[in-house]
Image (tube, helix red, strand yellow):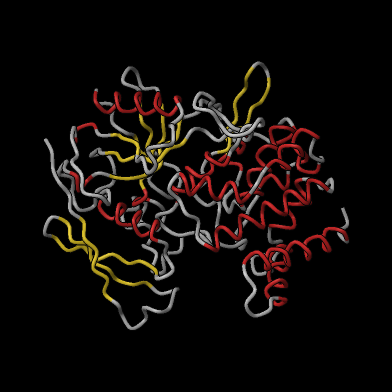
Amino acid sequence: MSAVVDVGLGPIHMGFAHNVHKPIVIYLTVAGSVIPMCILESDSVASVELKVQTCKGFLVKKQKIQNLGYLLQPVIVNPYLKIPNVIWSMLNSASKGLKFGKKPVRSTEGTGGTYFMRHAVGNETVAVFKPVDEEPMAVNNPNGLPVSETGEGLKRGTKVGEGALREVAAYILDHLLTGPRSTNRVMGFAGVPPTVMVKCLSPEFNHPLGYVGGPENVKVGSLQMFVKNCGSCEDMGPRDFPVEEVHKITVLDIRTANADRHAGNILMNREGGRIVLTPIDHGYCLPENFKDCTFDWLYWPQAREPYSKQVISYVNSLDAEEDIALLRSHGWDLSRECARTFRIATMLLKKGASKGLSPFAIGQIMCRVKVNEESMIEKMVKKAHESMLKGMNEGSFLEIVSEIMDFELENMRV
């Protein structure tokens, strides 16, 4: 069975088209049907393409889709990049499960559509799939959340439909202590499970307009390797967590300005009598601003311990510009706002760690004490804006931020 999907875009400019905070209505022409979709004028080309994919699960380019009964394939945006062996293994196991009738099981937790993909033999979960069109406030969200009118997600500074990109980005950015990940290594420094963008088809997903088994039902989303665990950090107090396990997660969260780090999205397991922590759910990392940065580990005693020499060495090796280029090579060209936040967050982490600040001290700079009161990092960015001269470029702006940050850190009580 095969089918060809043609997608055409026709922008309709309304009276509010030039306000980047208001939606623009465009129409998708799919197999003779016209489907309206809202985008923002500030959306990047990549995000619009993803929303097109999200709308009905199509891929933007014309192509033939075969084996629709058990379709699960990676979305490869750069054929020159090698997919790690562990991801191929995960894809193979999940695909076989679909082929042999193991239906995806939707999680009863969370605000978006999350599906457990099972092994062909038994009921072992091998991966977790999150369709972009079922994200919180997305058009096909299965939990009854209202569709976002502005395109902004549940967390300020994020956009509906980009959660899957952020899930994949967290894995890509989780480098090894020794440098870039090879095709055979599984986990990076923080232990983010292997994650990849895929297209998948199943009647078990949420299809409000009905399921016919054709290409119009194919969904795009993130597929993450399932990690065996004995619960999350919500299930026990943090007293027994190893300092190094907590610190590896603090580095990831500070660096990506995570807007949704709570104890429930840190898995816990025991390996050789030792507790190992695994961070998951990164759909709200790399936001456009610092307004909703949230770190539950701020209240854990391990966060008040200074970083070890090994961690500081790892932090010093991080390069925001190289990482932005790395994400671009994988298909996500960060928006100007997201890239700026990422650069400043990396800057704060590196400066703070080099000065001997604990994760708690650095996290306090990034997170708001009160919901409606700006954090220290927001105030630094605001002060830099006020110091800008007409015609200054992004590099000059970041230099001003760096100078202000140095001054604030020098006068900070640790």
Residue lying at the far bottom in this picture: please name it: 15
Instruction: Give the residue displayed 59% in from the left and 62% down from the top.
Output: 289
Foreground residue among 326 and 49: 326
Residue 173 position (above or below residue 362): above
Report x, y in % for residue 280: 53, 39
**Which residue is at a point 37% across and 72% down the rendered structure image?**
23
Q: Is residue 377 left or right of residue 181?
A: right
Query: Closest to the observer: 249 or 121?
Result: 249
Quadrant assignment for the N terminus? top left
Residue 351 % position (x, y): 77, 51
Q: Is residue 414 above or below residue 313?
A: below
274 relative to 291, above or below = above
Where is residue 343 drawn, in percent x and y? 64, 56
Residue found 24% across the figure and 64% down from its top:
9
| Residue 37 in sight from this viewpoint | yes
Q: State left or right for residue 390 relative to residue 115.
A: right
Residue 46 placement: quadrant: bottom left
Residue located 55% across and 53% down the image? 286
Q: Position of residue 306 (x, y in %)?
A: 82, 41
The mark total stands at 0
Specify whether residue 125 is in view.
Answer: no
Residue 139 or 76: which is nearer the viewer?
76
Q: Is residue 359 above or below residue 333?
A: above
Q: Is residue 98 left or right of residue 394?
A: left
